[in-house]
Amino acid sequence: MTVYADILFLVNFSLDYVSLYITGRLLSLKMSVIRLTAAGTLGGIFATLSLIFDIDGILYISLTVAVTILMTLAAYKKTGAAKRAGAAATLFAVGSSLGGVMTAIYSLGRGYRDSLTSDTMIPTVLFILVTGLSCAAVTLLGRISKRAANYKEAHVTIANGGESVRLKALPDSGNLLHEPISGRPVMIVRGEAVKCIFEPRLFEILVSCANAGALECLPREYVGKIRVIPVSGVTDDGVLLAYRPDGVMIETRGGAKCRDCMIALSSANGKFGGCDAILPSEFI
């Protein structure tokens, strides 16, 4: 059997690249062309070697899971372990779905595998058409959902220490903050709006910069609830202190749901487009 390794690599690289892109768009993950290229290359190499060395069975399944996880690590910027696990599962589902579409199309002719092991070339135009339409569809749906989200009304009720406060929230697909360890999303809240549910000392720590001095004076009972969150901006990078309150309920037109998330307090005096909180993108 003759295997065209270069064609096999190119096809799998393209499919992996598109699958990674679609996954990133669906989960609102930070990605770049360089990262997607590196991850797609990894997937293409694995697919080529697995066919050349005839890897199958349990070994193939185990390696596929491992490579899928490595691809998400390479493709997407830092996020929590839970988010990465979700990205790996989504990537597998997207890749399987896209591959199924390709297989169905190729089955009308000599088939995907035959095209790699014979003198018949893969229908390049059809391949480009399907992948291009997939990317275009995801991008269009993402823009439509983002535009629709801007018109959604949302309120958030934050409970802590026996007190609670209800705020008007701004859904924003640009809020991609997550706690690095648990992967919990982070909601930005105007400090003055929630000052009443925090002890004065804790409030002052949360609205301060995440420096060694602030963390050293942290009360022992709050050590497990406060995390340092890396923040990337257009002009600069920094950190925020995030706190896990006793409860968070998000209210939208679709109903009210309790959410497990953390909140980071902003010391800014002005509101966020007339709201006191910025919701994480995945809550939209």
Image (tube, grey):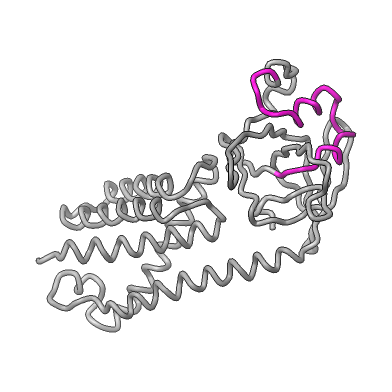
| Image point (35%, 73%), residue name | 102
Q: Is residue 209 magenta?
A: yes
| Image point (84%, 30%), residue name | 198
Q: How many marks?
A: 0
Residue that lies at the very extreme toward the front in this rendered image = 235
Q: In terms of image quadrants, where is residue 266? A: top right
Q: Nearer the viewer, residue 235 or 53?
A: 235
Q: Nearer the viewer, residue 87 or 167?
A: 167
Above or below residue 188? Residue 34 is below
Q: Nearer the viewer, residue 251 or 207?
A: 207
Q: In terms of image quadrants, where is residue 227? A: top right
In the rendering, at what x and y percent does residue 225 appear? 70, 28
In the rendering, at what x and y percent does residue 153 appear? 80, 61
Side of 9 relative to 29 (left or right): left
Q: Nearer the viewer, residue 185 or 237?
A: 237
Q: Is residue 181 magenta?
A: no
In the rendering, at what x and y percent does residue 145 appear? 64, 67
Residue that lies at the very extreme toward the bottom in this rendered image = 108
Side of 65 relative to 260 (left or right): left
- Image quadrant for the C terminus? bottom right
Side of 242 relative to 66 (left or right): right
In the rendering, at what x and y percent does residue 222 appear? 73, 23
Part of the protein shown in magenta: 187-213
Above or below residue 67? Residue 102 is below
- Image quadrant for the N terminus? bottom left
Side of 256 relative to 112 (left or right): right
| Image point (61%, 49%), residue name | 176
Residue that lies at the very extreme toward the left in this rendered image = 1
